[in-house]
Amino acid sequence: MDVWIDTDPSIGVPLHEADDGFALIQAFHSPELHLRGISTTYGNAGLATTTRITREMAARFGGPAGINDTHVFPGAASAHDLGKPTAATEALRAALAERPLTYLALAPLTNLATFLTLHPEAARRIERVIFVGGRTPGVRFRAGRWNPYEFTDGNFHKDNAAAAILLAVGSPLTLVSVECALQLLLTPRELTRLGREGGDPGCYLATKARLWMNLWCFCFAVPGAAIFDCFAILAATHPYLLASEKRYAQISPATHHDQVPTPRQIHLMASREPPTSGERAVTFCSEPLSEAREVILARLLGATG
């Protein structure tokens, strides 16, 4: 499968998420994927930071996928860059001119929506978009029995206007929800195993992500940390390891009709109800199957089988 990854890694930055770093290592070790390029954006950190980390990881660990730092292209620095051409949008245009690909969106959708706006004729060459976002109506994003903290649909909320542009185009769309990822947490013991058995990539992950792991375990009172973006890679390489179904997505205010919703009150809802008006058919991933943990860990450890 020819793929393009759009990402916002902040692994190693104190008090920031580390899951994009795990997803990149997983992708580098996935022979099912032909990685055509990587674009960076804001999200977990600023564009300069996400680009620096991505280039470092591509240079050090991208060899198995034929990737190095020259395959990394910076994109939007904020949601205000929606519609502005960048190195990322132009590199994606060039890649699609060669042949179609699947787009793995692990970050806010600003880069992709900008591309769709500037090059609508090329949109049909995107065979599928796999996006880490979307939610089931009525489901709250919580991990652990006693954890009061509710996670947000961050990639969507940081640029819901970009999500609206994506819903308006015809490319098949898979939503890998936060609720799916919260059902399979990477444990401290597994992180230690990566450092011990995973070679240089595993040692990098274990070292850079230790503080992140501790924050999840102690601040959220849960037995591990969520590797959200790894499930988008899994949806590309092993889709049968994620329970999925056809749903109907729309951007929906979660307020009464006489109120003006704030950005955090607007949601990308994926309903099982038959469409009425404005909904878009999507594939919605709701739950990892038991074998998913073994496959993700194997790829992080460097196994390609």
Image (cartoon, rainbow, N blue to C red):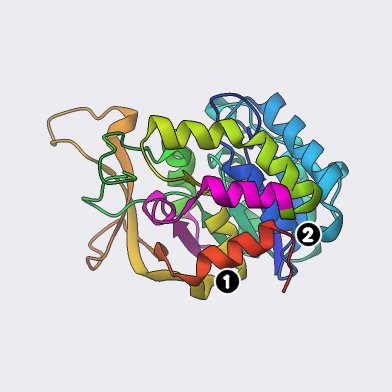
Mark 2 residue element:
helix
- Left or right: where 148 falls relative to 124: left
Q: Earlier in the sequence, mark 2 or mark 1?
A: 2
In the image, what residue occupies the spot 63% across and 26% down? 13
Q: Which residue is mark 2?
A: 97
**Residue range corresponding to the magenta coloring:** 169-196
Element under label 1? Answer: loop
What is the three-letter code of the residue carrying label 1? His
Mark pair 2, 1: CA separation: 27 Å
Q: Quadrant of residue 10?
A: top right
Residue 159, can we see it? no
Determine contact: label 2, label 1, CB under 8 Å. Answer: no
Please state which amino acid type lies under the numbered disc 2. Answer: Ala
Quadrant in the picture for the C terminus: bottom right
**Residue at the location (56% across, 49% down)?**
189
Q: Residue at the location (76% across, 66% down)? A: 99
